[in-house]
């Protein structure tokens, strides 16, 4: 299986993470996903009253220097870690 196929598999697995997954972890996944699929941030930062979108933008901006492949690998690793943590706590 190639990296892109594995990444797509783990994007589906991420949708089944428990509701107890922290917002910080979700933002990390969001930033890595956007970096892997879109590349560097290509929009301006949302306004100060749009807290959710601003947090998502910041998470994406935080991984801006990563290559698409590195972002995919980091995303897969993070989903695996969250799955293991969820399995250990249930």
Image (tube, grey):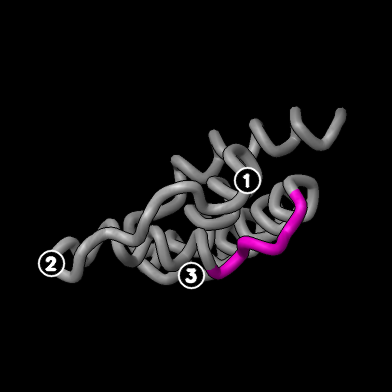
Contact flag, marks 1 and 2 (Cβ < 8 Å): no
Q: Could you tell me residue 31's position as x and y percent? A: 52, 57
Kind of element beneath mark 3 = helix
Instruction: List x then y, in percent, for residue 24.
Output: 42, 71
15 left or right, relative to 12: left
Residue at the (27%, 59%) spot, across then down: 46
In terms of depth relative to the viewer, which is nearer, 10 or 68?
68
Quarter holding residue 55: bottom left
First in sequence, mark 3 or 2: give its number.
2
SS category of the residue bearing label 1: loop
C-alpha distance separating marks 1 and 2 = 26 Å
Which residues are the magenta region? 62-67
| Residue 47: x %, y % from top left | 21, 64
Q: Nearer the viewer, mark 3 or mark 2?
A: 2
**Magenta segment, principal secondary structure?**
loop
Q: Earlier in the sequence, mark 1 or mark 3?
A: 1
Q: Is residue 60 magenta?
A: no
Q: Classify 1 as above or below 83.
A: above
Q: Which residue is mark 3?
A: 89
Q: Name the foreground residue: 63 vs 83.
A: 63
Disc 2 target residue: 49
The part of the image, by quadrant, that contains residue 80 is bottom right
Q: Is residue 14 above or below residue 1?
A: below
Query: Which residue was labeled with disc 1?
Result: 39
Q: Earlier in the sequence, mark 1 or mark 2?
A: 1
Query: In this view, which residue lies farthest toward the left?
Result: 49
Q: Position of residue 59 (x, y in %)?
A: 47, 65
């Amino acid at each position: 299986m190639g990296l892109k196929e594995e990444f797509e598999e783990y994007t589906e697995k991420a949708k089944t993470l428990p509701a107890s997954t922290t917002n910080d972890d979700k933002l990390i996944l969001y930033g890595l996903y956007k970096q892997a699929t879109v590349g560097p941030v290509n929009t301006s930062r949302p306004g100060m009253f749009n807290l959710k979108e601003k947090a998502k933008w910041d998470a994406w901006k935080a991984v801006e220097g990563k290559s698409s492949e590195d972002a995919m690998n980091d995303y897969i690793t993070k989903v695996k870690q969250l799955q293991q943590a969820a399995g250990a706590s249930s």
